[in-house]
Amino acid sequence: MLIAGNWKMYKWPGETREFCAAFAPPDGVDAVLCPPFGSLGAGVASGHTIYAQNVHWADEGAFTGEVSTSILLELGVRGAIVGHSERRQYFGETDDTVQMRAQHALEAGLGVIACVGELEAERERGETEDVLRRQVGVLSPHEHLVVAYEPVWAIGTGKTATPEIAQEAHAFIKSLLDAPVLYGGSVKPENAEELLAQPDVDGAHAVELSGTPVFDALWARYPHTTLDASGRAVGLPEGQMGNSEVGHLTIGSGRILDQDLQRVNRAIEEGSFFENAALVGAFERAKHRGTNVHLLGLVSYGGVHSHIDHLRALLELARRQGMAERTFIHPFTDGRDVSPHAALRDLAELPQATIASVAGRYYAMDRDQRWDRTERAYEALCVGRCTQAHSVLDYVQASYYRGVTDEFVEPAAIEERPRLGPGDAAIFFNFRPDRARQLTTKLVDAGFDLTTMTRYQEGFPCPVAFEEQNVAETMAEVLAEHGARQLHVAETEKYAHVTYFFNGGREDEWPGETRILVPSPRDVPSYDHKPEMSAREVASRFCDEIGTGYAFAVVNFANPDMVGHTGSIPAVTKAVETTDKCLGEVVEAVEAAGGVSLITADHGNAEQMLEADGTSPHTAHTSNPVPLVLTDERIALAAKGELSDLVPTALDLLGFAQPLQMSGKSLLR
């Protein structure tokens, strides 16, 4: 079986040498590595089979940026990829040029992997066979020719062709040309076995960008399964993607809780929202004073921190209270939990005359003590000492023209609209607390009449529309009841998640609980500039501490999620590879301490970096199941589970009884 790995524009020579030194193909597998041009020599020196990612049809000449067969042969390269979808999409590759590249390379004695496959639009129009017939038709049979079917709609989008789809396409290609056919659409450890079992799938052309040898080895060696981490499995509406707050709360409590998104949705549906004392009170106070009401929060369909439907309900409440003419909106644009350019569409759905300012969440929702960002959002909201815009839609569109996406829209005030001033009432409609705290602190310190959708922090003197749920008998509490020591470790960006949220909304430590906070980098504007973040220190601090005697520990690596939100594929590649190395250190330290590891995620993100069009960056979470690996070969796991099953599984491993309040089930079999 042939497995080819296309590294695209990743792995420098040093990284290539490091990878090749540690890489050993499994028995029965012929592995081909395809590094970028500058790393070909390092790959060849390793003794592995190395292919280039492209080759020209001329032996020499004025073809800047191309590489000839003679150069590749002298380097010791054994073959080349031709016709890759990215070459077709970005560099004008045609069937004719693919034919010339393939023919010349084969005649020169190089092997060829010729890529074919349809775009999503072509598939939706039923043109798959027509596209394949045209692309395969320019190729001639040859003993060193291999075809790679890469459905473009399944590359980097998080989508994968089912084994049945792959088999159908491969069989059709083989009816056109006598050649081995590899599958090349998002091959992953969890789907490779089923894809490669299809009768006409002869191997894989893997285009996964990140090298994850540690996780891949753990997945191959130990019991593993997948966990549902979105929608009803975590107390959210069906199809709603999960998030870090919801995920850690579900994991730590061992049960499915009605999350705040669902609680507010239900209140709107049942009508109690329009009678909520805290919300109605804000309108009544402003009405009594003859002042305005200001609605501020994240405006999108993301459902992670807020939802645009909740803003619509507040506008309806304003109408019922006779305050529609004196109610104004201060939207924060998203770009992380939804598409980076969704704000233009979402803001257009709101009454334009009510929008008084705008700011990207980068400024209005900072949670890492970068108060200069918070100050800029505050200035637009309350003072107007900022850019002035005539129209919010024109301003956001102009931001796009400058290359500024929704998350980073600079705060601006809309001309001739009121600011939040003395005597006004304000309602902060974000339901997730962590990214609302800094701006709330600023508003509270300034003495504004502020009502919040949920309780953002103990001590805020604000009316709260939806109070916290009491979550008893969490994992942390059960461990404390047994007198068992526990360790919680993360860097700043995920520290609240492994402590406050994991512990069911409890701020204080339990007896026997140790918390380690590693500062996240503050010297970069966003984490694509430092994708390793503080992962190495997190791993180091964890490994130093775990050997001192703990019954249980939880550690979170923030990189794949936080860097995934930037939409930068090279940065995410580095983030994932860094995390993989740190994972190896953690698992080794746990094993040395006599323990076993449960390796999982609280939601998806970095596995999908492109939208369905195959080009636009995907910056939001996904609703994909997450993997679970248990590093104990003696134990079997259930075929499928949910996040709420994770802690019951850990309790089962510890031999502790599961509290009745936990609805999750142990996955041990």
Image (spheres, rainbow, N blue to C red):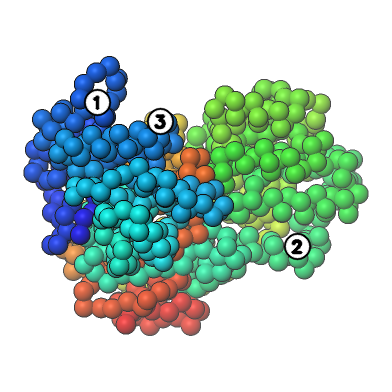
Counting from the top left corner in percent of width and height, residue 525 is at: 45, 31
For the residue pair 141 and 405, the one nearer the viewer reads as 141
Counting from the top left corner in percent of width and height, residue 548 is at: 21, 61
Q: Residues within 10 Å of mark 3 (few under 14, many from 20)?
A: few
Q: Which residue is mark 2?
A: 268
Q: Nearer the viewer, mark 1 or mark 3?
A: 1
Counting from the top left corner in percent of width and height, residue 632 is at: 23, 72
As drawn, the label of residue 91 is 3
Q: Is residue 227 left or right of residue 573?
A: right
Q: Which residue is mark 1?
A: 58
Residue 484 vs 459, above or below: the answer is: below
Residue at screen point 59% across, 66% down: 238
Q: Tell me which amino acid carries mark 1.
A: Ala
Helix, strand or loop at label 2? It is helix
Helix, strand or loop at label 1? It is loop
Residue 633 vs 623, above or below: the answer is: below
For the residue pair 59 and 447, the one nearer the viewer reads as 59
Q: Tell me which amino acid carries mark 3.
A: Phe
For the residue pair 454 and 82, the one nearer the viewer reads as 82
Q: Tell me which amino acid carries mark 2.
A: Ile
Q: Is residue 226 left or right of residue 23?
A: right
Q: Residues within 10 Å of mark 2 (few under 14, many from 20)?
A: some
Marks 2 and 1 sit apart, C-alpha to C-alpha, by 68 Å
